[in-house]
Amino acid sequence: MQTSERSYRCHYTPTDRNGFPVPAESGVLPFIQLRAVGAEQAQRAAHAVTGCPIDNVERIEPIDAFRPLLDDRTMNLLVRAHAIAQAGRFA
Protein backbone atom coordinates (compact mmCIF):
# COMPACT_ATOMS: atom_id res chain seq x y z
CA MET A 1 0.00 0.00 0.00
CA GLN A 2 1.22 3.48 -0.85
CA THR A 3 1.98 5.79 2.04
CA SER A 4 3.33 8.90 0.32
CA GLU A 5 0.93 11.52 -0.95
CA ARG A 6 1.20 13.05 -4.40
CA SER A 7 -0.25 16.18 -5.94
CA TYR A 8 -3.33 15.88 -8.14
CA ARG A 9 -5.27 18.35 -10.29
CA CYS A 10 -9.00 17.59 -10.48
CA HIS A 11 -11.14 19.28 -13.15
CA TYR A 12 -14.80 19.55 -12.24
CA THR A 13 -18.02 20.51 -13.99
CA PRO A 14 -19.76 23.37 -12.15
CA THR A 15 -23.43 22.92 -11.34
CA ASP A 16 -26.27 25.37 -10.80
CA ARG A 17 -28.35 25.48 -7.61
CA ASN A 18 -30.57 22.67 -8.95
CA GLY A 19 -27.58 20.38 -9.56
CA PHE A 20 -27.57 20.63 -13.36
CA PRO A 21 -24.19 21.01 -15.14
CA VAL A 22 -23.32 24.52 -16.29
CA PRO A 23 -21.19 24.70 -19.46
CA ALA A 24 -18.06 26.83 -19.19
CA GLU A 25 -18.13 29.84 -21.52
CA SER A 26 -14.43 29.50 -22.32
CA GLY A 27 -14.60 25.73 -22.72
CA VAL A 28 -12.00 25.27 -19.97
CA LEU A 29 -13.15 23.44 -16.86
CA PRO A 30 -12.17 24.83 -13.47
CA PHE A 31 -9.93 22.71 -11.26
CA ILE A 32 -8.64 22.29 -7.76
CA GLN A 33 -5.30 20.89 -6.68
CA LEU A 34 -4.90 18.63 -3.69
CA ARG A 35 -2.68 15.96 -2.21
CA ALA A 36 -3.81 12.35 -1.96
CA VAL A 37 -2.45 8.81 -1.88
CA GLY A 38 -4.06 7.84 -5.20
CA ALA A 39 -6.21 9.15 -8.04
CA GLU A 40 -9.41 7.63 -6.67
CA GLN A 41 -8.89 9.22 -3.26
CA ALA A 42 -8.16 12.55 -5.00
CA GLN A 43 -11.38 12.24 -7.02
CA ARG A 44 -13.43 11.51 -3.91
CA ALA A 45 -11.84 14.39 -1.98
CA ALA A 46 -12.39 16.82 -4.87
CA HIS A 47 -16.05 15.84 -5.07
CA ALA A 48 -16.41 16.29 -1.31
CA VAL A 49 -14.85 19.77 -1.50
CA THR A 50 -16.65 21.07 -4.61
CA GLY A 51 -19.89 19.08 -4.55
CA CYS A 52 -19.59 18.89 -8.35
CA PRO A 53 -18.99 15.99 -10.73
CA ILE A 54 -15.28 15.42 -11.34
CA ASP A 55 -14.39 15.29 -15.04
CA ASN A 56 -10.79 14.06 -14.80
CA VAL A 57 -7.88 13.64 -12.38
CA GLU A 58 -4.24 14.31 -13.33
CA ARG A 59 -1.22 13.46 -11.22
CA ILE A 60 1.25 16.34 -11.09
CA GLU A 61 4.87 15.21 -11.15
CA PRO A 62 7.71 17.34 -9.81
CA ILE A 63 9.66 19.09 -12.57
CA ASP A 64 12.93 17.43 -11.50
CA ALA A 65 11.56 14.07 -12.59
CA PHE A 66 11.61 15.18 -16.24
CA ARG A 67 14.84 17.16 -16.39
CA PRO A 68 17.41 15.35 -18.52
CA LEU A 69 20.95 15.02 -17.22
CA LEU A 70 23.30 16.81 -19.61
CA ASP A 71 27.06 16.64 -19.70
CA ASP A 72 29.17 19.72 -20.53
CA ARG A 73 29.64 18.76 -24.19
CA THR A 74 25.91 18.39 -24.82
CA MET A 75 25.10 21.60 -22.94
CA ASN A 76 27.67 23.58 -24.97
CA LEU A 77 26.23 22.19 -28.20
CA LEU A 78 22.71 23.26 -27.19
CA VAL A 79 23.87 26.73 -26.15
CA ARG A 80 25.71 27.19 -29.46
CA ALA A 81 22.72 25.97 -31.50
CA HIS A 82 20.43 28.35 -29.61
CA ALA A 83 22.78 31.29 -30.21
CA ILE A 84 22.95 30.53 -33.95
CA ALA A 85 19.16 30.19 -34.16
CA GLN A 86 18.63 33.51 -32.36
CA ALA A 87 21.18 35.28 -34.56
CA GLY A 88 19.44 34.01 -37.71
CA ARG A 89 16.04 34.90 -36.36
CA PHE A 90 16.86 38.57 -35.81
CA ALA A 91 19.14 39.07 -38.84
Image (spheres, helix red, strand yellow):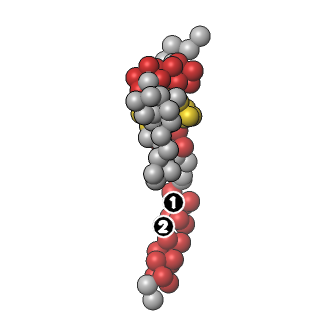
Return the x and y of residue 43 as percentages of the image width and height: 52, 24
**Residue for point 50% across, 78% down:** 84
- Extreme residue in the right direction: 1
Q: Which residue is mark 1?
A: 75
Give the amino acid type for the residue marked by disc 1 in the picture: Met
Total marks shown come to 2
Marks 2,1: beta carbons within 8 A: yes
**Residue for point 41% across, 26% down:** 50
Q: Nearer the viewer, residue 9 or 67?
A: 9
Task: Choose top left, top right, bottom left or bottom right for residue 51.
Answer: top left
Q: Which residue is mark 2?
A: 79
The answer to whether residue 9 is visible is no
**Residue for point 56% across, 59% down:** 74
- Extreme residue in the front direction: 18
Q: Nearer the viewer, residue 72 or 48?
A: 48
When the figure is inspected, residue 89 is found, relative to residue 78, above or below; the finding is below
Circle 1 Cα neighbour tier, 10 Å, few/some/many (<14 / 14–19 / ≥20): few
When the figure is inspected, residue 68 is found, relative to residue 61, above or below; the finding is below
